[in-house]
Image (cartoon, coloured by chain):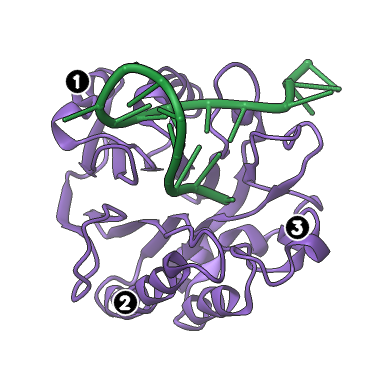
Chain colours: A purple, B green
Amino acid sequence: MKLATWNVNSLKMRLPRVLDWLAQHAPDVLCLQETKLEDPGFPTLELDAAGYSAHFTGQKTYNGVALLARKALPAATDVTRGLPGFADDQRRVIAASYGDLRVVNFYVPNGQSVESDKYRYKLEWCRAATSFLRAELAAHPRLAVVGDFNIAPEDRDVHDPVAWAGQVLCSDAERQVFRDWGALGLADSFRLFDQPPATFSWWDYRMLGFPKNHGLRIDHILLSAPLAASCTSCTIDRNARKGEKPSDHAPVIAEFEA
DNA sequence: ATGGCTGCTTTGAGCAGA
């Protein structure tokens, strides 16, 4: 079983790459963020032709998340959108069950800067997400929480920790949220394995960010204990960041026994 | 080789991303 997450920065622009990537990697589930599509414009037919069933919640210009699942999987059940008790026009959360596998797909707010109202919104959003995840864990033993978290959990996830110290994506409050989710019983699958240093999932389009590997690891796959026990690898596909018209994020992939 | 932002929007300068 293979589970992946990818912030595509506009599914309209990235659909050819997504279809190529699905054909090459054949994940069982691929979670997308920043689709930037209203639901009637979602490319359901193209993905169906590629062998994937889609569930999604989107809006124009910003945000938007989707779950793509190979049709061989059990049909999605218990599909939920948004965070309970957190009224929000921004489409950032979708979750579904495939048999006993539960997948939560997050596009965590960016926050812009620690002085910004958007940062306060980010922390409030994360507080609601913590409550949601506690309930999801209680209901679903085999839980994966994936997506663009917009949090670099530790200094080793940052190309220049001194420059980023205390900045948005790296602030103490954001890193505490990541630890809180870990304390609920969600393991960072990437850190279950030895990894090359300076492995990142996002690189700024500007200033030769990718060629210089000036990146951050902000896209994650968290696993409940039963899922973590069967996880055999977690990798970031930096090849997907190369070439013409890449997203600024690379996919994260977790593989499991059976 | 992977190369000095990109995608979006009441179409075009400005916002947002991270």
Identified by mark 2, the residue type is Ala
* Badge 1: chain ID: A
Give the residue number, with chain letter if any, for mark 3: A194
- The image quarter in which residue A204 lies: top right
Q: Which residue occupies the foreground of this view, A33 or A186?
A: A33
Q: Amino acid at mark 1?
A: Leu
Chain assignment, label 2: A
Mark 1 or mark 3, which has the lower sequence index?
A: 1
The N terminus of chain A: image quadrant: top left
User: Do circles 2 and 3 both sit on a common chain?
Assistant: yes
Residue A68 shows up from this direction: yes
Residue identifier under label 1: A45
Q: Reading the chain from its start, which is encountered first: label 1 or label 2?
A: 1
Cα distance between the residues tagged 1 and 2: 34 Å
Q: Is residue A239 above or below residue A189?
A: above
Q: Nearer the viewer, residue A155 or B12?
A: B12
CB atoms at circles 1 and 3 under 8 Å apart? no
Regarding mark 2 in the picture, which secondary structure is present there?
helix
In which chain is the residue bearing label 3? A
Q: Position of residue A29 (x, y in %)?
A: 36, 42
Label 1 in the same subunit as label 3: yes
Q: Residue at x 57, y 36 (%)?
A: A248
Q: In the picture provided, is A257 more to the left or to the right than A243?
A: left
Measured in 3D between alpha carbons, the distance from the residue under mark 1 to the one under mark 3, in whole angstroms, is 39 Å
Which residue type does callout 3 highlight? Asp
